[in-house]
Image (spheres, grey):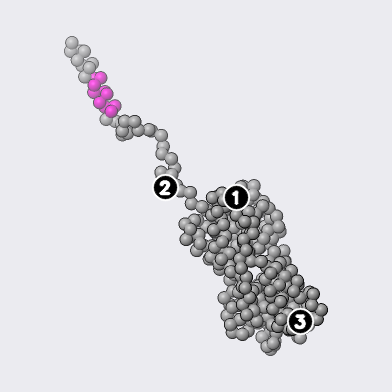
Amino acid sequence: MKNMLKMVMFIVLSFALLVGCSTEPPGASSEKEPAAAEGNDDKVKVGLSISTLNNPFFVTLKEGAEEQAKAKGIEIVVVDAQNDSAKQVSDIEDLIQQNVDVLLVNPTDSAAVSAAIESANNANVPVITLDRSAEGGEVVAHIASDNVAGGKMAGDFILEQLGNKGKVAEIEGIPGSSAARERGEGFHQAVDAVAEIDLAAKQTADFDRAKGLTVMENILQGNKDIQAVFAHNDEMALGALQAVEAAGLSDVIVVGFDATEDAVKAVEDGRLAATVAQKPAVIGQQGIDTAILVANGEEVDDFIPVELELVK
């Protein structure tokens, strides 16, 4: 009898110990909770590859994108290609490895960037181009001003100022960039058909102010009677203006493109004749808004235009 009582007490005690050792309430599962319960969220991550941050226009574009990303509560990673096509390809490959949901690309070279865009396509990362287009790879949207229309706007203004007669020069942007090609195309649509307009010089200055100065100095050596200059961006226009002023020429019409802060001030001061105003901050903002739509699986237009105007 004693032995049986001891056995019953042992069983009861063992059961009590088992229940006491359990830290989970009855019916609780021992499986790990989903990651969302640990603070994981679905925040959109956007990569932005900029051609160069040595140009005020693209600095403003970047700032517009960053401000909109902050306002929309999404993550943005910005990389600067420093006008180096090979670096831009490497930068984009790195952004893909960082698992961005959407890529915003402002190409240094419209052809060279194609390989990087194709890499993004293979990784199923949607690509949106900003300001400059890409010649290869699949792009879901392109956000930019109409560069051809802007170039024609500059050409028409020069024709008006010269009375359809005079000697002009053209300073081109980076060869291979869509912006240089399209702005030049629009400019030539305006001036080529006018018989008494003499395009006396056409040289490249890579969208750079210092190069614009040097190129314009070279042009003036053989063409002291140049009456007007169209530069494919404001940085080159301001460099050209510096050369014109240093040569003591006060009546040369210089027209730029982008409406950067320095250029607009030069127009207000009466030094620069005009600049075609793009809106880089708006391009950056539109890039973020479009990236969010794409990340959410929504359809977007192939081309999203940003309005132009002539500041004179």
Pinpoint residue 99: horizontal percent, then vertical percent.
Answer: 55, 50
CA gap, disc 3 and disc 1: 49 Å
- Residue drawn at point x = 41 percent, y = 39 percent: 33
| Residues rendered magenta in the picture | 10-19
Pinpoint residue 30: horizontal percent, then vertical percent.
Answer: 38, 33
Given the image, on which type of amino acid does mark 3 rest?
A: Asn
- Residue drawn at point x = 63 percent, y = 84 percent: 271
Pinpoint residue 48: horizontal percent, then vertical percent.
Answer: 57, 59
Which residue occupies the extreme right position in the image?
195
Q: Is residue 5 magenta?
A: no
- Residue drawn at point x = 51 percent, y = 52 percent: 44
- Determine which of the numbered discs, if any, sits on residue 164 in the image: 3
Specify few, some or many for label 2: CA neighbours under 10 Å numbering under 14, 14-19, or 20 or more: few
Q: Mark 3 vs mark 1: which is more N-terminal? A: 1
Direction from residue 286 to residue 27 in the image, left or right: left
Q: Is residue 79 above or below residue 20?
A: below
SS for callout 2 = loop
Q: Is residue 114 above or below residue 155?
A: above
Res. 216 in view: no
